[in-house]
């Protein structure tokens, strides 16, 4: 059905969690935007780390420590290649994408944003790409502005040009909305920011797992994403241009981010370790490297083609259900693998519980995007999200259960 080059049936066999039943029904996992499932290869390397070379990195001169360090740093180089960063020194491990964005707000923002400056974001943002800038704007007495979207969830082109002004110091934008699914014109946004001398921070948590990404071609200054949304464990990544990272002060202080410590002063380690204080998530970073291997072998063009096809199928089937409102663009070329919808007569939490009884995992709520829901006059939505292991039959089951929901609530 997808014509993507992916053997989805074979892929599904790589994911042990998909082989189970829930409430006596086959598991239908449609919540990959929250976290993806993990293939056997990732699970195995985590087990291997703890069984065979569990040790702290960088400090030890014995075999276990050297093996752990080699794999940890080797994963960094895999990530560098995956996003086409110039250097592995531009790839920083964080706890998650949220921490990566906060790192930029604290380490770059507090040194460069001043009173009277403007920070520009979009109404499509996840809370993680709003709240840090709210805090920064309040502290620095800067102005926070938002690029609006039209009724289809597409950013307004005129706003991109007029909202980003000579007073703008920083632009924060998602590459793909986790609710509307919108694929934003991120290259245009970056270019506009650079045209007036601003720095651009990209939330790519819903983009890097799902499509080819080239940070050099996009020319983004900072780029945040999460390993757990791309088949890996719970670890995050911040890409930053080396020239900017070199000038920034550390976000956290402690071990491994230092070169020298004296009672009166300290000297920082070189990149990327300047921003990796303390013992990091070693096994998780190694696991992310294996996840990158898995996705690379599939081909990110194929991943995108499969998701586009399954999303098109879902938009068609869900859109045909009477009384359903879908957020975001209806053209699958303009969105990622996310379909959030509302049933006016039913609260999304109730809808999600009914789906659960059928073995279907969907998300009900505001999805850490309350401002976007307010913008469209909706309290919350039910969200189905897809990935490499999603199949049309799961969409059919979703739509079949939607009919039951409407019957229960007399919608």
Image (cartoon, grey):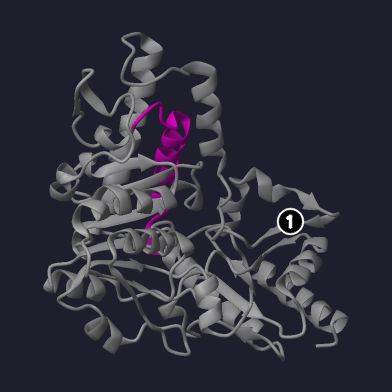
Magenta-colored segment: predominant secondary structure = helix
| Residue 334 placement: quadrant | bottom left
Quadrant (top left, top right, bottom left, bottom right) of the C terminus: bottom right
Who's the residue at 38% across and 56% down the image? 299
**SS for tag 1?**
loop
Judging depth in this view, the residue of 54 and 409 nearest the camera is: 409
- Left or right of 96? Residue 57 is left
- Tell me, yes or no, whether the highlighted magenta stretch contains residue 405: no
Position above or below: 191 against 234 = below
Judging depth in this view, the residue of 309 and 86 nearest the camera is: 86
Q: Which residues are magenta?
A: 277-301
Who's the residue at 44% across and 74% down the image? 124
- Left or right of 257? Residue 21 is right
Report whether residue 212 is seen. no
- Left or right of 46? Residue 84 is left
Q: Which residue is identified by label 1?
A: 27
Who's the residue at 41% across and 45% down the image? 236
- Tell me, yes or no, whether the highlighted magenta stretch contains residue 280: yes
Residue 325 spot, x, y in % from top left: 63, 86
């Amino acid at each position: 059905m997808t014509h993507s080059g992916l053997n989805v049936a074979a892929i599904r066999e790589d994911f042990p969690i998909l082989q189970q039943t829930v409430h006596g029904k086959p598991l239908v996992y449609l919540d990959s935007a929250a976290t993806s499932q993990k293939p056997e290869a990732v699970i195995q390397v985590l087990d291997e780390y703890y069984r065979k070379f569990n040790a702290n990195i960088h400090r030890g001169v014995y075999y276990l420590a050297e093996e752990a360090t080699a794999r940890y740093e080797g994963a960094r180089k895999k990530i560098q290649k995956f996003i086409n960063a110039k250097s592995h020194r531009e790839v920083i491990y964080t706890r998650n994408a949220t921490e990566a964005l906060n790192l930029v707000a604290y380490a770059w923002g507090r040194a460069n944003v001043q009173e009277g400056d403007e920070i520009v974001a979009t109404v499509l943002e996840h809370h993680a790409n709003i709240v840090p800038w709210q805090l920064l704007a309040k502290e620095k007495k800067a102005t926070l502005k938002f690029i609006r979207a039209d009724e289809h969830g597409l950013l307004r082109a005129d706003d991109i040009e007029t909202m980003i002004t000579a007073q703008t110091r920083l632009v924060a934008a998602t590459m793909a909305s986790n609710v509307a699914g919108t694929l934003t014109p991120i290259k245009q946004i970056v270019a506009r920011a650079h045209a007036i001398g601003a720095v651009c921070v990209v939330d790519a948590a819903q983009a890097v797992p799902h499509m080819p990404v080239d940070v050099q071609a996009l020319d983004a200054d900072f780029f945040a994403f999460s390993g757990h949304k791309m088949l890996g464990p719970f670890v995050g990544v911040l890409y930053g241009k080396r020239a900017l990272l070199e000038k920034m002060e550390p976000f956290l202080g402690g071990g491994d981010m230092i070169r020298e410590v004296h009672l009166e002063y300290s000297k920082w380690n070189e990149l990327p370790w300047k921003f990796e204080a303390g013992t990091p998530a070693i096994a998780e970073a190694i696991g992310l490297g294996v996840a990158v291997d898995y996705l690379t072998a599939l081909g990110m063009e194929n991943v995108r083609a499969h998701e586009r096809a399954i999303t098109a199928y879902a938009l068609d089937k869900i859109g045909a259900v009477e009384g359903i409102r879908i957020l975001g663009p209806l053209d699958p070329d303009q969105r990622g693998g996310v379909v959030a919808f509302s049933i006016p007569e039913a609260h999304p939490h109730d809808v999600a519980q009914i789906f659960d009884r059928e073995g279907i995992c969907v998300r009900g709520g505001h999805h850490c995007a309350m401002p976007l829901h307010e913008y469209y006059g909706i309290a919350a939505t039910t969200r189905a999200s897809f990935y490499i292991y999603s199949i049309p039959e799961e969409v059919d089951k979703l739509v079949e259960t939607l009919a039951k929901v409407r019957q229960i609530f007399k919608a």
